[in-house]
Image (spheres, rainbow, N blue to C red):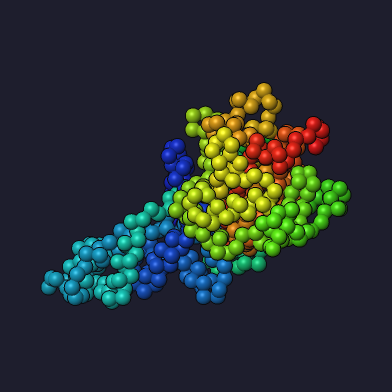
Amino acid sequence: MSFSLAWIVLAWACCWGARSADAMETGQFYSSLAQMEFLFDFDEGVGELLLNFPEHLPAATRYLESYVGLRTDRDLGREIRGHPVHVFLVLKRLVLFWPRIASSLFIYTRLEGSCQDQNDGCEGWALSGNCLHYRDYMIEHCTKSCHACLSPELKEQVMWVMSKASIPMPSMQDLRGAALALSRLQSHYHIPVGDFMTGRIEKAQCTPRLTVEDCVLVADVTHAHGRYSTAYIWYDYCQTSASIDPRLQAEIKARKEKLEAEHDLKFIAGNINFFPEPLREKKNQVPWDSPFHQLCRGVYNQNEDKDQAGLMCYVDNRNSPYLTLQPVRYEQLHTDPEMYLFHDVVSDAEIAVLKQLAMRTLHRSVTLASGPKHTNVTEQRVSHTAWLRNSSHAVLERLAHRVAEVAQLEAHEELLATKEAEELQVLNYGIGGLYNAHHDVFYKNVPEYKWSEVNVYANEHQAGDRLATWMFYLSDVIAGGRTAFPDANVAVAPEKGAAVLWYNLKKNGNCNTKSLHGGCPVLLGQKWVANRWIRENANFRRRPCSTDPME
């Protein structure tokens, strides 16, 4: 078996072997780029150490194959920490190669004193190749003859790296999640697989390349998630790229044929996970698209904008004395649902405070679910969440007051029975991070007689449903990351310091189904947002009810 094929088999076994419930919840790095910051720093420390290390470590060769490319891009000033290929390769290095390097480096933490041999036979043993065959003993007792002497600076680097290695490291779940993110970005943004393989994303080029083995891992993970059309495209590219290794190419062909059979057996016409036709009838097909995906790419339906011609921009105080000396710049984005974009409503200093507070409690975002757990960790939502109360910092109280004045709604946290708004939810997205299209309402998207069956948090009905959503944009995003409303034909690009407000409920109290929205995958850069959901019952005076079924 070739090395390449062995790597694939190992990766597949590790990714999909024993998928316990606990293992499915372990991937905590790929789902938040903020949580990846330490890993990038650690990866740099390991890479620089290995470049200057006197001993040849077999695993170091594989580690440095892609690290030197990251080093080149860093020197060129290219985007690194928000580039999906770099994120994937950092996780790959730390998951697949770092454990073997760590075990090799550990012996150096026990070396003390000057670099000397401790046995007269060391030179002869070294000439016989025992530095390799009996490595640990020889490095410790025959340091000089094995040419394993470290300078004080290099010894300090080793100690720093090993001291950081005790902190939790990424798992195969993280590498699997990053691989799925690459396929998600490719399918959402219609980027050729070859561009991902060569590191070309939009206008951001990266030096390191994905290998055929990486390509197969992406295809395998995508196939396992039932995304047949996307997986087929990746397998097809992998098979062509493996032409110099017939055994590897044969293995990829077998997996592709298995996918073809499964695609046609489970085929669902019109389902986005399948091609438009069975593969036995037509091999070369373009996957289905969707309005959500199109909006994520900035493609709008021109036929749906005829009734939005009267939308305008404003600069005024929103009828609030609080805003008289500092009027707000805003624009109306849509009338149904009613939607506004407010510019410069949170400062850089306030954003820094929110991020600092959120970093203390960021955890994997969940979705509501039925059953005893009530929540699910799912690839439908790839981000980390932190909840911040107004009492946690003066900035939170100030922002809550500002939201209330600008939105002209009651939007403070109160006791449950009179809750005006929920705690501020701060989100940081991961590689290809997204939130698939959904409604923000708890229960008003189903008939009234089913409200009691909807899984919501205890006593949430007392405050009414989520009348409106206020979303702060806490960062710019280089590419991707729009907030898309497929039924309203609106997509809002992240703008640091801005906020978007939309109403989830009509004035008659019913769910406005056109408020369906989602967070598009982040293609390049980091995305931070903060949501405040404004509740219904406390705002009956601010937004009077209507008996008109259409209003």
Seen from the viewer's position, the closer of residues 354 and 77 is 354
* Residue in the picture at 79% in, 58% down: 313
Q: In which quadrant is the C terminus drawn?
A: top right
Whether residue 220 appears in this view of the structure is: no
The image shows residue 107 at horizontal and vertical percentages of 25, 63
The image shows residue 60 at horizontal and vertical percentages of 39, 65
* Residue in the picture at 30% in, 63% down: 105
The image shows residue 281 at horizontal and vertical percentages of 73, 40
Seen from the viewer's position, the closer of residues 29 and 12 is 29
Seen from the viewer's position, the closer of residues 119 and 3 is 119
How many numbered marks are there?
0
Whether residue 508 appears in this view of the structure is: yes
- Point out the residue furthest to the left here: 120
Asked whether, in this view, residue 393 is left or right of residue 202, the answer is: left
* Residue in the picture at 69% in, 58% down: 323
Seen from the viewer's position, the closer of residues 110 and 124 is 110
Q: Is residue 161 above or below residue 425?
A: below
The image shows residue 226 at horizontal and vertical percentages of 60, 40
* Residue in the picture at 36% in, 55% down: 167
- Point out the residue furthest to the front here: 321
- Point out the residue furthest to the top here: 449
Asked whether, in this view, residue 242 is left or right of residue 113, the answer is: right
Quarter assignment of residue 54? bottom left
